[in-house]
Amino acid sequence: MTGWILVGGRLVMTQALRALPRPDLVVAADGGGQHAAVLGVRVDAWVGDFDSSNGLELEAPREVHPAAKDETDAELAVLVARERGTSDLVFLGAFGGRFDHTAALVLGGLRLAGEGLGVTLHSGDESAHPLLPGAEMSLDLPGGTVLSVLAFSPLQGLSLRGVRWPLEDASVPLGSGWTVSNEAAGGRVTASVKQGTALVTVLHSS
C-alpha cells in the first residue's frame, strides 16, 4: 500500500513526478496540503499544528496538534499513514524551505527505510532514495541524468552500475564528495552497499 505524504517544501511538476504510481492514501502535513491541487489528489487526512497553512482550504479530515509537540508535522503524517497500513511512503515537497526540516526529513526517511518501509523523497526536479545494506536499488533514468551517492556513514562494498563512472566494491568515507555528480548511461541504474547507509539523489529535467 502506497502513501503520499505531502510536506511543505518545493514541488515542481516534471515528467518524473507525473510518472509516479498513484497513491492508495494521501496524508498532508500542515502546509504541505498546498500541493494537493497541483498533484490532483484528494487528501485523506490533514495533520499538524496548522501554523503554516493560513488561508489554505482542503476538504479533508483535520487532526490538530499543539505547536508545543515532540514530533514534526511530517512525523505526525507518517504515524497516520502507518496506522492505516501504508508500507511504501513517498514524501512530496521534500526539498527546499528550511534546512532543518529537510535534514530531519532525510534522516527520518533513512530510519524508516531501516525499519523496512519503502521510502522516496521527491520534489519533482529532485528525488532521493535510501540505500541500505542487503537491498539493491534500481532506477530507470534517461542518459545524462545527474545522480549522486551521499554517504551518511562510512560505506563498504559500494557498487554502482549503469552510470558514466561505475563503481565496484568501493569504500567511501562519510560525507565524501567522490560519489557526487555521476551520470546515468541511459536505462537501468543499480546500486548496492555491503556496509553503511547512503542516499542516492537524482536531478530530474522537466
Image (cartoon, grey):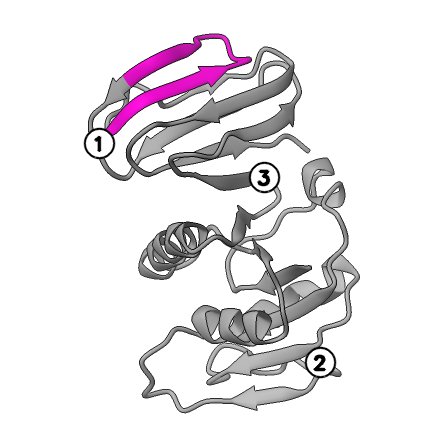
Mark closest to the chain's N terminus, 2 or 1:
2
- Say what amino acid the circle numbered 1 marks: Pro
Secondary structure beneath dot 3 equals: loop
Provide the residue designation for mark 1: 154
Residue visible at 79% across and 61% down in the picture: 40
Residue shown at 75% from the left, 41% from the top: 19
Report the residue at 69% width, 46% height from top: 13
Foreground disc of the pair 2, 1? 1
Residue in the picture at 58% in, 28% down: 138
Left or right, residue 121 beside residue 101 = right
User: Circles 1 and 3: CB distance less than 8 Å?
Assistant: no
Identify the magenta region. Answer: 155-170
At label 1, counting other C-alpha atoms closer than 10 Å, the crowd grade (few under 14, some 14-19, many 20 or more) is some
Q: Nearer the viewer, residue 96 or 7?
A: 7
- The quadrant in which the N terminus is found is bottom right
Q: Earlier in the sequence, mark 1 or mark 3?
A: 3
Q: Label 2 sits on what residue type?
A: Leu
In this rendering, position of residue 206 left or right of residue 157: right
Residue 148 location, x and y as percent?
A: 42, 27
Q: Which residue is mark 2?
A: 58
Question: In the image, is residue 204 part of the stretch drawn in magenta?
Answer: no
Question: Can you identify the residue that label 3 sits on?
Answer: 125
- Does 20 sit left or right of 204 as displayed? right
Quarter occupied by residue 53: bottom right
Q: How far from the left and from the top, in percent, is residue 60?
A: 71, 83
